[in-house]
């Protein structure tokens, strides 16, 4: 395993608002890897770190868009996300808990004229937050090549 667990993902199109969006001028290439302790080369964030990044990005973007739509002033947003993850579950069967995060904590620091309750409600509309907190059916197909 010369490259460890590095993975390259091509993001070139998506479907939304009732149509395909496949005309990106340049597709995105996302590199993920794992730290050396997991036999990786640390050439990019791990897939689990990507989950946290996606959550932080979604919460802050959702807050910014919804606040603008509601005519609320936001001067600054900073989002801290951390998760408890047992790395041993990646390489061996877990003893007590399943693989994945045991808990994720999100703290959003916002400089705004809006109330804390209103800001929390706007943040809670994040689609990534909803995806992580609600059961979502996922199908997995493995095809041998």
Image (cartoon, rainbow, N blue to C red):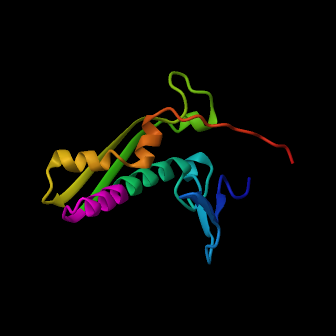
Q: Is residue 57 above or below residue 94?
A: below
Residue that lies at the very extreme toward the front in this rendered image: 18
Left or right side of 126 for 21: right
Q: Residue at x 36, y 52 (%)?
A: 59
**Range shown magenta:** 60-76
Q: Indicate the position of residue 82 as horizontal and vertical percent values.
A: 37, 45
Instruction: Please state which of residues 78 and 88 is positioned toward the viewer in this rendering.
Output: 78
Q: Quadrant of residue 114?
A: bottom left
Along the line of sight, which residue is nearer the eye, 18 or 141? Answer: 18
Left or right: 66, with 26 as reference point: left
Is 75 in the magenta? yes
Q: Residue furthest bottom?
A: 25
Please tell me in which quadrant of the rendered image residue 141 appears: top right
Q: Is residue 135 left or right of residue 66?
A: right
| Viewer-proximal residue among 145 and 120 | 120
Q: Is residue 84 magenta?
A: no
Furthest residue toward right:
145
Judged left or right of residue 59, residue 143 is: right
Image coords of residue 112 (percent x, y): 16, 60
In the image, residue 125 lies at what x, y percent?
A: 35, 47
Residue occupying image coordinates x 48% and y 51%: 49
Identify the residue at horizontal 69%, vertical 38% (top origin): 140
User: Front-most of 40 and 129?
Assistant: 129
Residue 83 is situated, as x and y percent measured from the top left of the image, at 40, 41
Q: Which residue is found at the position 59% from the left and 55% from the top? A: 33
How many marks overall? 0
Is 27 located above or below residue 91 in the figure? below
């Amino acid at each position: 395993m010369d490259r460890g667990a590095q993975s390259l993902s091509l993001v070139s199109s998506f479907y939304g608002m009732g149509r395909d969006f496949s005309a990106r001028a340049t597709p995105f290439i996302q590199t993920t890897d794992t730290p050396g302790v997991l036999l990786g080369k640390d050439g990019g964030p791990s897939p689990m770190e990507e989950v946290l990044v996606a959550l932080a990005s979604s919460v802050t973007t959702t807050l910014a868009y919804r606040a603008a739509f509601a005519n609320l002033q936001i001067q600054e947003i900073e989002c801290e996300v951390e998760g408890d993850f047992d790395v041993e579950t990646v390489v061996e069967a877990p003893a007590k808990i399943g693989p994945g995060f045991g808990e994720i904590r999100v703290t959003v620091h916002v400089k705004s004229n809006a109330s804390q309750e209103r800001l929390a409600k706007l943040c809670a509309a994040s689609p990534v937050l909803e995806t992580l907190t609600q059961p979502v059916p996922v199908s997995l197909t493995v095809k041998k090549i």
